[in-house]
C-alpha cells in the first residue's frame, strides 16, 4: 500500500540526513458526499466520483469550499465560476482534488477528481457503502453495470478517434453580401462589472459545428489568446471543446459571443472579477456578417444583467479574419524582446532573490502543463532531467526557496506554489501574469497583486523569466517512456524505478542515499529493467559482483558520481527494490570518508549546551554546536569495524544511548538534538 512520507531535514555540519514520518492514508471513499446524493459512482478506471444532489450548484460548491477547508484542504489556482457551473481545485500535502459542480435541472451534478488518494480494490461501489436511491440492490447493480459499459464504450470510441479529424458537413450556401465594401470596424470590447470598467483589445473569431449547425464565435480578451489548443480542438471535434469535452479557459476578463448560421447574435458570455454573466436571443442587439474569411459586426447587451449582487453590461465590436480547422496558429513570440530571468520572494522580514530559472513540461490530470520554477539556488539538473517525460516530473520538488508556476496549455497560471523559510504555500491568491509558452520558449511575468499571510507572516512575489522549456518534445510525444519487459521507467530522487508500485521511501545523508519501492513485477523483469536503465556512460555494471538467487538479487554499478547497489527481493508476485548510492568524492572532501579497511564514527552536537559523550566507556565532551557546521569539529574517529555503544547526556537531561555496528568502508554519525535525545544514521 502506498504511503505519504514527510521528509524532515536536519543539519549535521555538511552531513545532512532525513528521517521519515508516515502519515495516515487518505482514501477516495473518505471524500465528503452531501446528504441526499443519488446515483453515486466511484470509478477507479475513470478516475473520478460522480453523483447528483438536489441543491443548486452554488450551494453545492459552497458546501465543498467549507467542508474541505475544515478537513485542512487548501485552494489551488483560481476558481472557474460560470453561470451554470463551478470548478474548484484543492490540495493537501501531496494530494489534490478537483471539484466540478454543474447545474442540472433543479439540482446539481458533481464530479470529484482526486489525485494521490487510495482507491478500494474494486472499481464499483457497493449499495451498503453509498447513499443510493431507494431501489433494490439488483436494480442498483444493473444500473452500475450499464453505466460502466457506457463509460467503457465512450473511452474506446475516444481511443479510436484520437488524432483523427472529424468529418463535418459543408456550411450552407448564402447570397454574397459584399463584406469587402464595408468599412473596417475597430476591435475592442468593454465590460462594466459592479461599477468597474474593463477594456479588451484582443479579438479572435472562429467557426464551430455544434448542435447540428455551423456557428461563429468571437472572443475578446485583454491579452492575445494562444491559438494552438483552439485549432487542435477544431480539427478533432469541430468545436472549441477537446475530445474529453473539456472547454477552453479564456483569460479573465473576457467577452464571448456566438453567431448562428445566419450570423444573428445568439448568445453572449462574459467573466470579470471572478463573476460570470450572459445574455441570449432577445437580450442582445447588434448585427454581424461572416463572409470571405472575415467576421465583422458589433453586439451588446440591451439591458444590464446581474449575478447575485453584481450588476454587469458588455459590448463588443470586431472585424477580424475567421479562423477555421485549416488555419495555422498565430505566433506570439516572433519579435518579443528577451526578458530578464529574475525575481524576488518576500516571506516575513526575509527577501529571497530568485535568480535561477528552469521551465519544464509535465502533466496534471493527464493534461499537458508547463512548470516554471524561479529559485534562490540552482535545481539539481541531473535529477530533474532524469524525471522529464516521467510521472515524477509532475510533482518534482527541491528544498530551496522558490516560486513555482504551473501553466496550462492556454498560458493561464493553473496553480502557484511557494516554498521558503520551511513553509510550503499553495493557493489561489490574486496574481497578475503575462505568460506565453511557444515553440519551446517560456516568456512572461507574474506577481501577487496583494500580499498573502501565512502564520502571521506576510508573503509576496514578483518574477520575470525568458527561458527554454525542457522536455517539451518528450512529454508531448507518445509514449514518452518505452516499456522494458512490460515495465515503464519513472524516476525518484534522480534514479530509475518502474512506474507504479507502492511504499516509496527515501532516506540518507549527503553521501549515502537509500531509495526503496515495491513494484508489481517478477524478479527477472526488474533485473532486466535495471541492466537496461543503468547503462553507459552514466553507469557501468561490475558484473563479477552480481549475486542472483531464486528470490533475491544484488547488482553493483559505478558512475561518475560514485557507486550504486541495487538490492532486489522477491515477494510473491511483487519485487522490493532498494537503490543505495554513495558519493566517495563528496565524503572525502567533507572529511567523513573511512580509510582502506576501516570505518568512521562521528558525533555532532546540534544543541546550545556542551554534551557529555561516552563511547565504549571512554568519556568525551562535545561543545555546543560542535560538528553542526563542520563535521570535523565534532568527534570524528577512524575506527576498526565493530560494535560501538554511544551514550550522550546534556545538562539536566536524561542520558540517551545508541548502539552502532560500524562495518568496513562505512561511516556512521550520531547527532545530539536540542531536546537531549540523539539520532544515529549511516552517513557513508
Image (spheres, grey):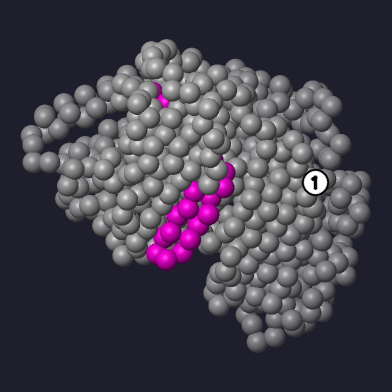
Q: Nearer the viewer, residue 336 or 436?
A: 336
Q: Nearer the viewer, residue 436 or 342?
A: 436
Q: Is residue 396 magenta?
A: no
Residue at point 74% right, 27% down? 534
| Left or right of residue 309, residue 542 in this image | right
Residue at point 77% right, 57% down? 342
Q: Position of residue 148 (x, y in %)?
A: 27, 26
Dominant secondary structure of the residues highlighted in magenta in the image = strand
Residue at point 78% right, 25% down? 535
Q: Nearer the viewer, residue 598 or 179?
A: 179
Q: From where the camera sits, is residue 559 visible? A: yes
Residue bearing mark 1: 338
Q: Which residues are magenta?
A: 189-209
Q: Position of residue 591 (x, y in %)?
A: 90, 58
- Furthest residue in direction front, as rendered: 181
Residue at point 53% right, 47% down? 188
Q: Position of residue 1 (x, y in %)?
A: 45, 41
Q: From where the camera sits, is residue 645 visible? A: no
| Left or right of residue 75, residue 380 in this image | right
Quadrant for residue 275, please give it: bottom left
Would you place residue 52 above or below residue 24 in this image?
above
Mark 1 nearby-residue class (10 Å; few <14, some 14–19, many ≥20): few
Q: Is residue 199 magenta?
A: yes
- Furthest residue in direction bottom, as rendered: 652
Q: Nearer the viewer, residue 425 or 12?
A: 425
SS state under label 1: loop
Would you place residue 483 above or below residue 363 in this image?
above
| Left or right of residue 44, residue 463 in this image | right
Q: Position of residue 268 (x, y in %)?
A: 37, 43
Amino acid at each position: 500500500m502506498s504511503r505519504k512520507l514527510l521528509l524532515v531535514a536536519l543539519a549535521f555540519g555538511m552531513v545532512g540526513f532525513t528521517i521519515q514520518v508516515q502519515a495516515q492514508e487518505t482514501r477516495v471513499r473518505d471524500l465528503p458526499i452531501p446528504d441526499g446524493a443519488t446515483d453515486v459512482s466511484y470509478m477507479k478506471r475513470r478516475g473520478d466520483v460522480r453523483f447528483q444532489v438536489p441543491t443548486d450548484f452554488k450551494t453545492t460548491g459552497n458546501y465543498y469550499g467549507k467542508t474541505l477547508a475544515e478537513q485542512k484542504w487548501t485552494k489551488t489556482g483560481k476558481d472557474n465560476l460560470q453561470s451554470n457551473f463551478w470548478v474548484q481545485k484543492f490540495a493537501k500535502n501531496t494530494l489534490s482534488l478537483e471539484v466540478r459542480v454543474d447545474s442540472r435541472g433543479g439540482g446539481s451534478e458533481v464530479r470529484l477528481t482526486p489525485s494521490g488518494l487510495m482507491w478500494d480494490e474494486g472499481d464499483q461501489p457497493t449499495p451498503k457503502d453509498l447513499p443510493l436511491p431507494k431501489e433494490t440492490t439488483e436494480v442498483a447493480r444493473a444500473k452500475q453495470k450499464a453505466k460502466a459499459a457506457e463509460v467503457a464504450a465512450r473511452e474506446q470510441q475516444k481511443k479510436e478517434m484520437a488524432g483523427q479529424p472529424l468529418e463535418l458537413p459543408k456550411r450552407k450556401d448564402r447570397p454574397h453580401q459584399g463584406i469587402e465594401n464595408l468599412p473596417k470596424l475597430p476591435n475592442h470590447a468593454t465590460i462594466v462589472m459592479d461599477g468597474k470598467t474593463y477594456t479588451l483589445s484582443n479579438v479572435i473569431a472562429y467557426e464551430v459545428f455544434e448542435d447540428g449547425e455551423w456557428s461563429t464565435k468571437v472572443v475578446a480578451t485583454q491579452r492575445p489568446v494562444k491559438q494552438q489548443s483552439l485549432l487542435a480542438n477544431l480539427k478533432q471535434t469541430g468545436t472549441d471543446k477537446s475530445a474529453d469535452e473539456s472547454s477552453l479557459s479564456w483569460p479573465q476578463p473576457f467577452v464571448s459571443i456566438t453567431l448562428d448560421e445566419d450570423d444573428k447574435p445568439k448568445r453572449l458570455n462574459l467573466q470579470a472579477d471572478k463573476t460570470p454573466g450572459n445574455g441570449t436571443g432577445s437580450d442582445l442587439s447588434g448585427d454581424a456578417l461572416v463572409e470571405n474569411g472575415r467576421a465583422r459586426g458589433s453586439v451588446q447587451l440591451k439591458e444590464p444583467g446581474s449575478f447575485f449582487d453584481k450588476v454587469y453590461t458588455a459590448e463588443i465590436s470586431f472585424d477580424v479574419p475567421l479562423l477555421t480547422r485549416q488555419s495555422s496558429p498565430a505566433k506570439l513570440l516572433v519579435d518579443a524582446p528577451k526578458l530578464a530571468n529574475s525575481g524576488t520572494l518576500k516571506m516575513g522580514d526575509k527577501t529571497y532573490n530568485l535568480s535561477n530559472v528552469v521551465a519544464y513540461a509535465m502533466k496534471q490530470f493527464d493534461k499537458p502543463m508547463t512548470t516554471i520554477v524561479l529559485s534562490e539556488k540552482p535545481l539539481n539538473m541531473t535529477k530533474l532531467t532524469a524525471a522529464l517525460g516521467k510521472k515524477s516530473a509532475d510533482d518534482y520538488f527541491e528544498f530551496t526557496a522558490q516560486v513555482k508556476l504551473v501553466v496550462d496549455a492556454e498560458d493561464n497560471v493553473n496553480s502557484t506554489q511557494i516554498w521558503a523559510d520551511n513553509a510550503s504555500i499553495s493557493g489561489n491568491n490574486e496574481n497578475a501574469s503575462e505568460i506565453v509558452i511557444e515553440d519551446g520558449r517560456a516568456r512572461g511575468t507574474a506577481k501577487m497583486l496583494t500580499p498573502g499571510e501565512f502564520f502571521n507572516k506576510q508573503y509576496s512575489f514578483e518574477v520575470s523569466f525568458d527561458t527554454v522549456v525542457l522536455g517539451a518534445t518528450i512529454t508531448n510525444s507518445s509514449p514518452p517512456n518505452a516499456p522494458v519487459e512490460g515495465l515503464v521507467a519513472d524516476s525518484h530522487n534522480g534514479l530509475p524505478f518502474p512506474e507504479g508500485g507502492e511504499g516509496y521511501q527515501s532516506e540518507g545523508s549527503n553521501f549515502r542515499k537509500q531509495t526503496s519501492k515495491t513494484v508489481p513485477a517478477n524478479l527477472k523483469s526488474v533485473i532486466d529493467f535495471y541492466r537496461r536503465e543503468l547503462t553507459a556512460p552514466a553507469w557501468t555494471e561490475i558484473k563479477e559482483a552480481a549475486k542472483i538467487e531464486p528470490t533475491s538479487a544484488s547488482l553493483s554499478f559505478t558512475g561518475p558520481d560514485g557507486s550504486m547497489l541495487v538490492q532486489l527481493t522477491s515477494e510473491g508476485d511483487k519485487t522490493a527494490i532498494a537503490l543505495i548510492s554513495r558519493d566517495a568524492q563528496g565524503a572525502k572532501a567533507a572529511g567523513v570518508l573511512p580509510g582502506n579497511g576501516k570505518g568512521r564514527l562521528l558525533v555532532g552536537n546540534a544543541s546550545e549546551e556542551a554534551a557529555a559523550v561516552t563511547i565504549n566507556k571512554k568519556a568525551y565532551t562535545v561543545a555546543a554546536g560542535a560538528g553542526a557546521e563542520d563535521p570535523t569539529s565534532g568527534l570524528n574517529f577512524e575506527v576498526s569495524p565493530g560494535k560501538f555503544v554511544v551514550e550522550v547526556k546534556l545538562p539536566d537531561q536524561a542520558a540517551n544511548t545508541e548502539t552502532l555496528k560500524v562495518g568496513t568502508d562505512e561511516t556512521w554519525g550520531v547527532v545530539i538534538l536540542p531536546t537531549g535525545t540523539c539520532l544515529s544514521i549511516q552517513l557513508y
